Image (tube, rainbow, N blue to C red):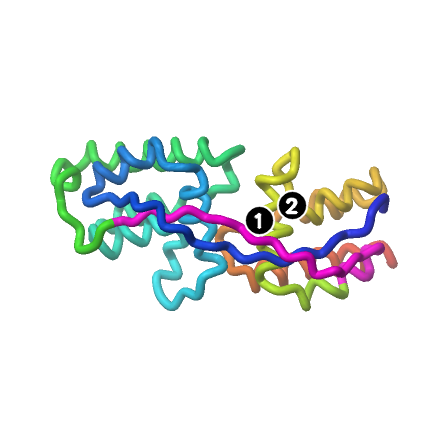
């Protein structure tokens, strides 16, 4: 490896924007112009927040559609949107708007229905901490992964997607530094979808992928 893997941790801070939507039509209209940091928070922020209900609805738009509009159809459609399918947050924004527009065309009542609660737009601000840990080998990184905090997994696997040139996680980027030597492992890690899961499950899957790869190399 060219450089050690620098282990970071992070916290995602919620910042009120003062913007809210009273109806589904207002939500759709405001989605067009809100900062992309709002889209990011309402899709990814739930991974770092404790959740005690709505496990089938991972983003805040789907949760609001179900709990406040009581529209299960829209909630399920929004819940199926995987942010990792889009190259940037603007692409994700367009998909959100299209799904809501389609539902509004199907039900005129939804355009004016007053939900039980408004949708409040929140933007994200990430705070990054350097743990001071530096990893030089795949073996050492494999041993450390089970002990990584949720914030570390979030930073290196999820937030990295908007920081790295190719939109990949930091593990894959670091492995790519060895050229073709560990390309197979890099591809396996890049193939993990971090959205429909928890950070704990994601940590286990990343660790399992590293472990299986090392066992295969040892024969």
Return the residue nearer the eye: 74 or 34: 34
For residue 9, above or below residue 84: below
Marks 1 and 2 close (CB-CB < 8 Å):
yes
Task: Judge from the rendering whether residue 139 lies leftward or rightward of residue 18; answer left or right.
Answer: right
Judging by the rendered image, the residue that carries numbered circle 2 is: 169
Picture disc at residue 205 = none
Q: Is tag 1's residue or tag 2's residue first in the polypeptide sequence?
A: 1
- Asked whether 138 falls inside the magenta stretch, the response is yes
The tag on residue 158 is 1
At 60% across and 52% down in the image, what residue appears? Answer: 155
How far across and how far down the image is residue 43, in percent?
A: 43, 48
Q: Left or right of 92: which side holds 71? A: left
Circle 2 residues within 10 Å: few <14, some 14–19, many ≥20: many
Asked if residue 76 shows in the view, the reply is no
- Res 78 quadrant in image: top left
Residue placed most toward the observer, 127 or 152: 127
Q: Residues within 10 Å of mark 1 (few under 14, many from 20)?
A: many
- Which image quarter: residue 199? bottom right
Q: Give the residue at x 51% y 60%.
A: 198
Residue under the point 65% across and 34% down: 166
The quarter in which the C terminus is drawn is bottom right
Q: Position of residue 121 (x, y in %)?
A: 33, 46
Q: Secondary structure at mark 2?
A: loop
Depicted 15 relative to depicted 49: above or below: above
Q: Under tag 1, what secondary structure?
A: helix
- Tell me which secondary structure the magenta stretch mostly adopts: strand
- Magenta residues (range): 119-142
């Amino acid at each position: 490896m060219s450089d050690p893997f620098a282990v970071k941790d992070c916290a995602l801070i919620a910042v009120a924007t003062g913007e809210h939507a009273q109806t589904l039509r207002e939500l759709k209209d405001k989605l067009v112009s809100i900062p992309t940091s709002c889209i990011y928070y309402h899709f990814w922020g739930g991974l770092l927040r404790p959740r005690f209900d709505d496990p089938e609805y991972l983003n805040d738009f789907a949760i609001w559609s179900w709990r406040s509009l009581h529209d299960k159809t829209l909630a399920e459609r929004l819940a199926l949107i995987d942010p990792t399918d889009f190259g940037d947050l603007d692409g994700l924004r367009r998909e959100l708007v299209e799904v809501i527009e389609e539902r509004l065309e199907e039900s005129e009542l939804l355009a004016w229905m007053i939900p039980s609660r408004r949708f409040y737009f929140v933007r994200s601000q990430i705070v990054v901490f350097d743990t001071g840990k530096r990893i030089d080998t795949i073996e050492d990184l494999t041993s450390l992964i089970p002990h990584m905090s949720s914030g570390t997994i979030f930073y290196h696997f999820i937030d990295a997607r908007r920081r790295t040139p190719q939109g990949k996680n930091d593990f894959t980027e670091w492995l790519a530094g060895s050229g073709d030597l560990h390309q197979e492992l890099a591809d396996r890690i890049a193939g993990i979808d971090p959205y429909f899961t928890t950070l704990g499950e994601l940590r286990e899957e990343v660790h399992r992928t590293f472990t299986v790869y090392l066992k295969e190399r040892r024969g």
